Image (cartoon, helix red, strand yellow):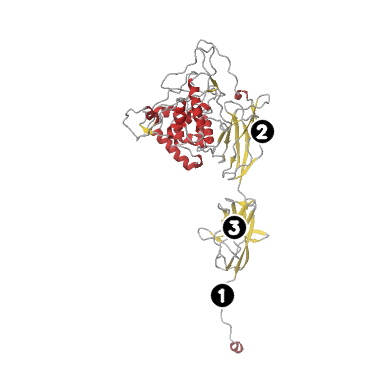
Amino acid sequence: MSAQFGRRLAKGAATTAVAALAVAALSASQAPGVTVDDHGRQSASDAQPTPEATADAGAATGNSPYYTDLPPLNSPSPSPSTSTGTPVAQGDAESGIPATVLDAYKKAEQAMQEAKPGCNLPWQLLAAIGKVESGQARGGQVDADGTTITPILGPQLDGNGFALIKDTDGGKYDGNSSYDQAVGPMQFIPSTWAWAGRDGNGDGVKDPNNVYDAALAAAHYLCRNNWDMSTQSGLDSAILSYNNSQDYLNTVLSWLEYYRKGTHEIPDGTGSVPSNRSDDGQKTSSKPSPKPTKNPPSTGSPSPTPGSSGSPSTPSSPSPTPTPTDTVDHLEDAGTAKLTAMAGDAFTKKISTKAETKAGKAVAKVRIRFTIVGDTDATFTGGESVATVVTNSSGTAVAPALQAGEKTGDFKVRATVVGRTITGLDYTATVTERVADTLVRTSDTALTCTAGGEFADQVEVKATYKSAVADKVAATATLIKSADDATENDKGPYFKDADGKTVRTLTGLTTDADGVLTLPKLYADDTAGTFLLRITTAGGATLDVQLTVTAAASSSASPSPSPSASATS
């Protein structure tokens, strides 16, 4: 059986290991010998995610329980869409995806091809996660707009067998004002939905209970760190960021491979719903399950396993071992340098935050959430305003690089501990205006004009900053009296405004993407002479351009008197 299972999962040279992991997931979900990880999640005792894969363990679901059923061993046989409800073989039934749910996955994939093509997100990955999280919205129990007929909620994350995440939304999404619960077909916790939520069906609302909104949010969440889903490392990292469990990774990969081999559309509401869950044998969950728990704790165990609810006759159970998160007392800055960047540029320095106990001891394996706060369009690399990073062995979490937007001024980045209510740590970042330090003309042609005429050539200059193109830099152009007197001249060359009126100062100018600024056409009044046009930019770059106006030739000059006429007079 394991050989067949391995062949079913095989894809390229790297998939022998994937097959072995999938078998391990099957064993872990159906056999004793499981342990509880830092999040209260059952997992195989020898399964450890790679450091690369857990670089961002924020977990969209808060590491809530999930369905552990694996695909059938027989490969799916794709078939055309059907609405007859005719019974099909097991492989066909499992590979069938409700029409509206399937449409949501495919639309999310299309959206990501435009928004983040380098992510290479396949819709089958969304389908695999949707299967594991909610059984494809409980077999497609959604209305015509894609909203679940009834809410799909995970158990309250009260630390009793699960992660401890106190209420973050006032019960807005999950109806629970004490603790958070995962919500909707893709099982987002409210605190994650607050920043990751998307409007996938264009109704102007970001609803975690709508499969279009949830699928698009999941797609952006998986692609937020520029992971490439066409690589195994990128795929693993993205899946583990959704739910930080090796068993979860194995289960999702199994369904991904299964759906890649073929799937078909089935009517909404006719899909199959998984039976087994990762919290089987733990506490009763408010997350609906079509069948009762199948794997209760072994009756031969002298005491309940960690994370289980224990015997009803037991008045109390031993206090759980504190998690690393429980021991954090405060956050300290870990040597963050001054955070300053020019508009449109990446910040060269990163934020470093250290988690410590009350005694000042570093705490590893703690999730630190970095949130951009304030009126700014700055983001973290990847375009998100929130990033969650796990502290390393020295207790330090380094936030992703910041990317400045176009809004200038100060904003804050707030570091908080996920799962703990302690004072956050604020970092001030500053976005300065775009500047240039050098201006040069793009041509050396002399700029001349006859009085009363117009200059044949327009003035064009190029701005640079530290020898690099200075794009989108603000500039001003003024016709001045002299090099020593920057007062606007009241005679000589001039520009025209939209109404054809004389203008000798232009403001609101901006260099283009190549750092080039082309001024409007110049005209000359009847004053001959040499004049100066001064161009200045933000940052202090200045360039004086000489303009020459020659006297106009007289077109009606009187003829000189003849010698004889002079003599007569």
Q: Residue at x 56, y 75 (%)?
A: 554
> SS for tag 3?
strand
Which residue matches tag 2?
A: 334
Which label's residue is closer to the chain start, 1 or 2?
2
Which label's residue is closer to the chain start, 2 or 3?
2
Which label's residue is closer to the chain start, 3 or 1?
3
Contact? badges 2 and 3 (CB < 8 Å): no
Residue 208, position as x, y percentages in the image: 46, 31
Residue 338, position as x, y percentages in the image: 66, 39
Which residue matches tag 1?
A: 554
Mark 3, mark 1: which one is toward the viewer?
A: 3
In the picture, measured across the screen, residue 188 lies left or right of residue 398, that is left
Q: Is residue 206 visible?
A: no
Which residue matches tag 3?
A: 461
> SS for tag 1?
loop
Neighbour tally class for label 1: few under 14, some 14-19, many 20 plus, Cα within 10 Å: few
Neighbour tally class for label 2: few under 14, some 14-19, many 20 plus, Cα within 10 Å: some
